[in-house]
Amino acid sequence: MEGKMPSSLARTSSLEAFPLLKEDAPPHPVSINRRLCLLAIATGLLIAAVYHGPGFVHDTSLAASDKLESSSPSQLTVEVSNEYGIQDNFTYPFLMGREDPTEAILIEPHRDTALTVRHSCSACSHVWKFPTLRMELSGGTVVTRVNTTGTHDLILCEAHNGVSTRTRKFVVYVKYVRRELRGLTSADREEFMVAASTLWKVSTVDGRSERYGFGDKYFDIYYFAILHNDLAGNGACDFLHGTEGYAFLNAHSALNLMFERSIQAVNPRFALPYWDYVFDSETYSLPHGADNSYMNIWNSDVFTSSLYGSTDSVTGVIQDGAWAGVDVPILTQELVDNAGITGHFRKHGFGSCHGQVADVCNTKTAQELFQCNASTLHQANAFGRLRSPWNMNSGKELIRSQQLCGSPNDNQFPDCTSLTDQYVTYDSFGDYTIALQLSPHGSIHLFTGGAFGDCSDSVPALSDVFGNEDFFSQFNAKLADLTKDLWMEGLKKCPRQGSCEGKEQSECSCSCPSVDITALKHQSLFELKNTSVWKFVEPYLSTDSTSEYIDEITHLVVLSVLDTVCNTEVLLGDMYTSNSPLDVLFFSTHSNVERMFHQKMLSGTMSNLRWPSTTPVSCPGGKAKWRNLWFDYEFDDKSIDSSLLTNDQFLSMLNPLSPHHAHQMNYIFDTIDWPYCGLENNSSLPTLYIWDLE
């Protein structure tokens, strides 16, 4: 229904919500048996790994006598092409995994697509019949456009001099293809930027109005920012990230699907492009160990007016392009209403047990969420801005700071090492998704967000106080993390939401109630090291290169650390906080993260896809039966209620080896290779995928 949140009250059965899955069925097999397949290629043999994937039903409507061997020259085959060239190299099991991969083709929706009969004779005529689309075309090459995603039949008939010679039935998958930002045609890039930036300019309510006519699946950017800020920025627990943030992949993929569908409501031609930021690391960064080795990444064409905008190196404000001067708004009820947030969540935070089963949210959890205002309020900072409560930035501009408290923000950026380590190390979903949050992903948020404020003046001066470069570098690198984590732990307090609205930046600040620097000056080193704040901070600073220094740490250094983490203003760029969806970088970043997951699954190296068990006190968002009631999306099977999908059910749909993905998800990635990292030649990642789905 237009303008309404998906209701958890309409249907209560998860089996009804997701008829393709059964709760008593075993998890979908993801351990893939391998065998060798010899393929004759030119003068030699190519040996490739053959995978046995999940069961897939082949079309058997043609009589056995009508089916020809795929190697036979008499078999009809089809070439598919559009403005991106021939579309026949998608390494997904529903295409390449068939006994004969030529019986399935993929067409992108809302694009003119040429279908050509391969190896046709000059005297032959052809008729293309799409029964479910009620469409019939004639010719050796035909151009068609299909505007609805899903699965269709194609019957191709060939006649020679009027006599029927060959007939073949094909399965046609109509799916979007997510491509790298810079892989789009120039025309598509320009049109995509216009369509995507609309979400920052046209509210949900206006977009659904008769004036724009975007429909009820259109959501503006403030819907996504409020949602993510609530789930990751409340004082009770982070529903999306952390040591039990098993919903990290699920929730961000759901956000991306809704964002993508909103763009398609504006212009239906576009999938959400991914940002292959590892490429930027390998292309633009200087050799490891060089001064400011990562800072040259800001010269990437991603940060230009034609893509996501260049950034002022001093202020961090986006200078040009479709997102120039984007603001971070004051959180008001009007903003919430215009974003299309209705029903229970109109005046309650998304960090809530509302609509969840007792096994996910017990009474104690619900009380904790209530006491921390996670379930009662939409989150904002003390100045009323749609920012994390611990981020005391009062400014209205969205910030991408290139600084890290007075130093170049040059500590880390995902590279080939972090990508391959993530790929090789983990074979169970629980371990994989927790690690996926870190170097292959999290450092992007820090790099494009940065940290600034009073710390830009005070922190560099600590280098002389510490007298140890390794310790100083580690402290500077972790200070932004500590700004959030001390607040989440309750060790640091910030003024209540909106209480500083209208005041100057210097008039409001956060502090640690248990740390009185004046009093601590007169206490012993032993007493300083036994404060709750130091005990919390020390593990962040301890590394192989700093452990000896910490063993011999002085009173002055501990006091300086406590004073800085508790009393120094550390303002954070918006990509590094819970309101990060306000920066368009967020969505293409997470599209690339999902692409990493596809690579892992399609490689056959994920041996355990079971949803991890959690403790009763775990944040409820990471539990297997948690349902994202905000997830308002229409799958190819329109009977599936997205808001009632549990975490484990939705994970099965995200798994590209699963038939649920083939039948319900309307997109694939153009490639899952990172050739500049050598992954396409990795011994555990074959260069050619062949799945036997029987």
Image (cartoon, rainbow, N blue to C red):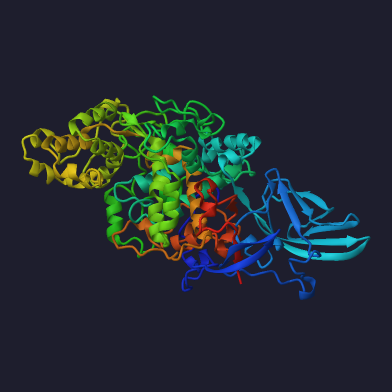
- Residue 46, by quadrant, is bottom right
**In the image, what residue occupies the spot 48% across and 25% down?**
319
Asked if residue 548 shows in the view, the reply is: yes
Q: Residue at x 84, y 65 (%)?
A: 166
- Nearest the viewer among 557 and 485 is 557
- Above or below, comparing residue 321 to residue 16 in the picture: above
Identify which residue is drawn at 70% across, 43% down.
Answer: 83
Q: Nearer the viewer, residue 339 or 184?
A: 184
Q: Is 532 on the left or on the right of 596, as rendered?
A: left
- From the viewer's perspective, is residue 655 above or below residue 537? below
Can you name the residue that lies furthest to the right here? 161
Left or right relative to 138: residue 636? left
Q: Nearer the viewer, residue 58 or 52?
A: 52
The answer to whether residue 628 of the structure is visible from this angle is no
How far from the left and from the top, in percent, is residue 147? 69, 50
Residue 619 is situated, as x and y percent measured from the top left of the image, at 33, 56
